[in-house]
Image (cartoon, rainbow, N blue to C red):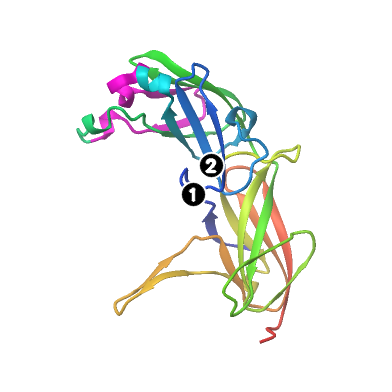
């Protein structure tokens, strides 16, 4: 069994299909995270967030927060407690190349990666004073649930398939997947993650190259999307493994000759 490519599950605040939101304890800020999969809970404080991967938070001021911050909203900074194993990235006045005035009434968002499961408090500070805070829980996934989609040869659309048995597919079928982090109680965790794909046997599949544009000078492609083609008949097992945690999910396929 051989690793083909590290393929990242990418989600941003703008393109997730579901999200979780909560106001800070002082009512001045609203914190949001989105995902490409549906969540069991929609309050951030009721969800555990995936460890080991950078999570991008969208932050907005409430009406009270906007009044209290005034023209200094872009001076708000974030601190995570405890901070062991925490990587916190935030934009701010020092990184805006002198263009602070145009964004002075906007609060900056941030991203954070937490290495160890546990309870953390995120504190937003304005001039060293607590502006708002929120308690967050982080957890490592116990397994990856795989949402699977296939496109038969020459078809134009993908169809969702259930991963509850050995799945029959035709040679040349394209497979796309979404790994969903699951905790030890079977609940879904919140956040984004990256996963490596392996296949056994390796020669049964090839990663897909996504063609964005072709002109006379070059072909513009996007590699790294979660997609592959079945290129050899027989049984094949596809495994997705979290790059930061010992969690994985598998799917089994039986590849038959193309019927067309």
Q: Quick check: can you spot residue 195?
A: yes
Q: Which mark is residue 164?
A: none
Residue drawn at (60%, 58%) of the image: 197
Left or right: residue 54 versus residue 216 is right
Q: Quick check: can you spot residue 81?
A: no
Q: Residue furthest left?
A: 98
88 lies above or below 249: above
197 lies above or below 242: below
Q: Position of residue 247 (x, y in %)?
A: 67, 46
Report the front residue among 26 and 184. 26
Report the front residue among 13 and 186. 13
5 lies above or below 68: below
Judge the density around disc 1: few (<14), some (14-19), many (≥20) Cα neighbours within 10 Å.
few
Q: Which mark is residue 15?
A: 1
Q: Quadrant of residue 200?
A: bottom right
Q: Which residues are magenta?
A: 68-96
Residue 80 is one of the magenta-drawn residues:
yes
Q: Position of residue 76 (x, y in %)?
A: 36, 23
């Amino acid at each position: 069994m051989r690793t083909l490519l590290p393929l990242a599950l990418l989600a941003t605040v703008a393109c997730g299909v579901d999200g979780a939101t909560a106001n800070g304890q002082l009512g001045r800020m609203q914190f949001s995270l989105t995902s490409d999969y549906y969540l069991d809970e929609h309050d951030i404080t009721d969800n555990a967030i995936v460890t080991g991967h950078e999570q991008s938070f969208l932050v907005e001021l409430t009406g009270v927060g906007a009044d209290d911050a005034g023209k200094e909203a872009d001076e708000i900074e974030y601190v995570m407690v405890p901070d062991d194993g925490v990587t916190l990235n935030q934009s701010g006045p020092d990184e805006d190349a002198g263009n602070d005035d145009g964004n002075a009434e906007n609060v900056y968002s941030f991203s954070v990666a937490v290495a160890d499961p546990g309870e953390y408090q995120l504190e937003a500070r304005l001039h060293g004073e607590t502006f708002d805070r929120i308690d967050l829980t982080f957890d490592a996934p116990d397994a990856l649930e795989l949402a699977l989609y296939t496109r038969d040869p020459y078809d134009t659309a993908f169809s969702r398939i259930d991963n509850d048995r050995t799945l029959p597919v035709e040679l040349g079928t394209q497979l796309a997947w979404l790994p969903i982090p699951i905790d030890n109680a079977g609940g879904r965790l919140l956040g984004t993650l990256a996963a490596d794909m392996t296949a056994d046997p390796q020669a049964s599949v090839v990663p897909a190259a996504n063609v964005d544009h072709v002109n006379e000078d070059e072909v513009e492609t996007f590699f790294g999307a979660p997609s592959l083609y079945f290129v050899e008949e027989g049984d094949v097992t596809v495994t997705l493994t979290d790059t930061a945690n010992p969690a994985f999910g598998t799917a089994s396929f039986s590849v038959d000759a193309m019927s067309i």
